[in-house]
Structure formats: C-alpha cells, structure tokens
Image: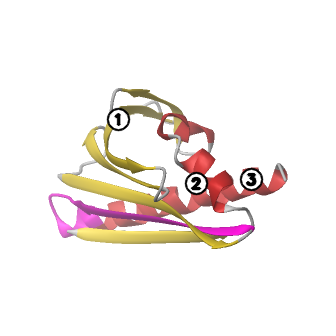
Amino acid sequence: MASITVQSDFPVDAATVWGHVGNTADVADWIPAIGSSRMEGDVRHVVFTDGEPARERIVAHSDTDRSYTYSYIDGPLPLEHYESTVTVHETGPNSSRVVWSAEFGAASADVEQGLTTGITEIYSGALDELKAQLTRSR
C-alpha cells in the first residue's frame, strides 16, 4: 500500500476555492491531465488527455467540511485499490490550503512506486493550474 499527500496554499478564500474543487463534475476544468469529465449519479466519468477513460465513485462529499472522497472503479491505471480525499481548509480571511491525499495499492512495489510519482505529478499540476486560474480571475 502506498500513500501520498500534496498540498498547496492559495491567496484566495476557502469558499471560492471549494466552489471549483467541490464541483466533482467539472474537474477537467482545472486538472490538466483530464480532457473531459461528467457525473452520472455518484460515478464520475473522466477521459484523460491521452483518450483513456476512467470511472471514479464519489463515496463522500461535504460542503460543510469542504471535502470529498472518491475511489477508482476502473480505467487505465493498474490499481488494485485507490481512495483519494481532497479538502479545502480556511487559513485566513483571504487564504486557504488544499490538501489532496490518496492511498492505493498495485500488484507490486515497483508499480506502486511508478504510480506514486505519476499521481503526485497529476495532483501537483492540478493544484498549480487551479491556483493560476483563481489568481488570474481576482
């Protein structure tokens, strides 16, 4: 089992950040690795920019806590288990922190190591893109 956590501070209030992060259907708007996304019930359908589709189940969502958790159903990644949580924390009147963590397992330690690197890059790139979008629109 592997785990990662990526966090980023935003010079934007938590409610504004959550308005983007908490909208589970539109993650393609701020995650560069995803070309399109949509919700069907509690299942998010995404298509990565390389054309590969994946499905994720939203297993918990709280606007009050500004947090949601999702699990990987199927797709191109060789995962045996994957659960991820993204949370927006208020750190001040006009500042916030996004914490995105995941626990996952794969068939071998080598595969897990490769996934750790890849998923960390996806999360970091997404938070960088979101920050750029939100600070441009201020």
The kind of residue on which mark 1 rests is Ala
Give the magenta-colored segment's residue range: 94-112
* Upstream in sequence: badge 2 or badge 3: 2
Q: Quadrant of residue 117?
A: bottom left
Residue that extends furthest to the front in the rendered view of this protein: 64
Q: Is residue 98 visible?
A: yes
Residue that extends furthest to the bottom in the rendered view of this protein: 91
Q: Quadrant of residue 13?
A: bottom right
Determine if the magenta segment contains residue 108: yes
| Residue 119 screen position, x and y as percent | 42, 59
Disc marking residue 54 = 1
The quadrant of the picture occupied by the N terminus is: bottom left
Measure how far apart labels 1 and 3 are at the Cα level.
27 Å
Q: Which residue is more in the foreground, 30 or 118?
A: 30
What residue would you read off at disc 3?
Answer: 134
Q: Marks 1 and 3: which is nearer the front?
A: 3
| Residue 134 screen position, x and y as percent | 74, 53
Which residue is painted at 34% across and 27% down in the image? 41
